[in-house]
Image (cartoon, rainbow, N blue to C red):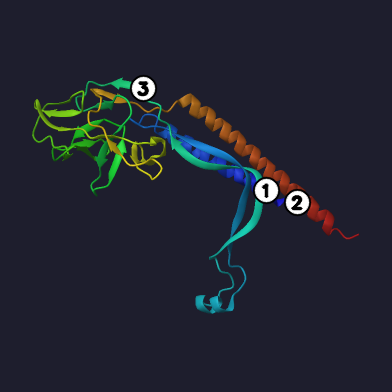
Amino acid sequence: MFRGIYAGMSAMLVQEKMLDVVGNNLANVDTAGFRGRVAVNKSFPEVLVDRVERYTVVDEALNEELGNRKFFPYVKGRTSIGTMSITNVLSETTMSTDPGSVQFTDNPLDVMINGEGFFVVEDGNGNTFYTRAGNFQKGPAGELMTHEGEFVLGNGGRIALGEAVSFFVGENGQVYADNEAVDQLQVVVFENPTYLHQEGKSLLSETPESGEPQAVEAPAVVGGALERSNVQIVLEMVRMIEANRAYEAAGRAITIQDELSGRLYTSVGRPT
């Protein structure tokens, strides 16, 4: 009967992760360039199940080392329980590549990629990230930055706007300051963009599964426009309701298994 409890617990963990993914998508519904993530569940014929055990029996050597304690709240290790059949587990989360809707802002530093690709940005520690969010601004030192404070990279590194007062971005990503071209936005593509890792809001980082970034020589961009989040609120709400119902059903199954176990112990342990 404990296998039924473990199966129900596994289902609850899957739905909990599903709710985390949906909640993150809904929290970023107004984040420019955000691309929602999709939780992928897979069913396996057999899954090896184990549990984490802690020290509950006094070990003389360890007892002496730790100061004669009667209980050790330290992890002893994993103990195999066995296999469960037809188990549904959370396999991975992938990024949706569906484009978001277009919002025309007429802001000269707002840029949208027309098609696939990602802007390349850099934080203050030199770490490189990728994003679809093109709501850029002029930083305190005259450098082109994102609204989150990352530096926007061009073909020549960080894009410097200097003391210019007027800006615009050309169709191929050229950045003009006071009608003079200063650099070109760096845009890259990935072989498997769905496997990019989300670092926070619209920032992404490469993974072994996504492949290495490949530069786009003549990117197609639209100035004065932004790509909005591709999250569909109605679809996410439906997923949330489904996950909640499945979570409740799994919890009820665990309760039934526990009640049946209690009846079994009572019946077997009753004197004849």
What amino acid is at disc 1?
Ile
Mark 3 against mark 2, which lies toward the viewer? 3
Quick check: 77 left or right of 139? right
- Amino acid at the residue labelled 3: Ser
Q: Quadrant of residue 72?
A: bottom right
59 versus 28 height, above or below: below
- In the picture, the disc for residue 101 is 3
Q: Position of residue 28 (x, y in %)?
A: 39, 33
Q: Mark 3 Cα within 10 Å, few/some/many (few <14, many 20+)?
A: few
Count of marks, rendered view: 3
Residue 159 visible in the current orientation: yes
Mark 3 or mark 2: name the one nearer the start of the chain: 3
List the residue tagged with mark 2: 261
Label pair 2/1, CB-CB below 8 angstroms:
yes
| Residue 149 at least partly seen | no
Secondary structure found at label 3: loop
Please state which of residues 193 and 179 is positioned toward the viewer in this rendering. 193
* Picture residue at 60% right of the left edge, 74% below the top: 58
Q: Of the numbered discs in the image, which one, if any, rests on residue 270?
A: none
231 vs 139: above or below: above
Considering depth in this image, is 210 or 114 the residue closer to the camera? 210
Residue designated by label 1: 5
Distance between the alpha carbons at the discs numbered 3 and 1: 44 Å
Judged from the image, the secondary structure of the residue bearing numbered disc 2 is helix
Say few, some or many: other residues with alpha carbon within 10 Å of mark 2 (under 14 / 14 to 19 / 20 or more): some
Residue shown at 36% from the left, 37% from the top:
201
Report the amino acid beneath label 2.
Ser
Residue 157 in the figure: left or right of residue 48: left
Q: Secondary structure at mark 1?
A: helix
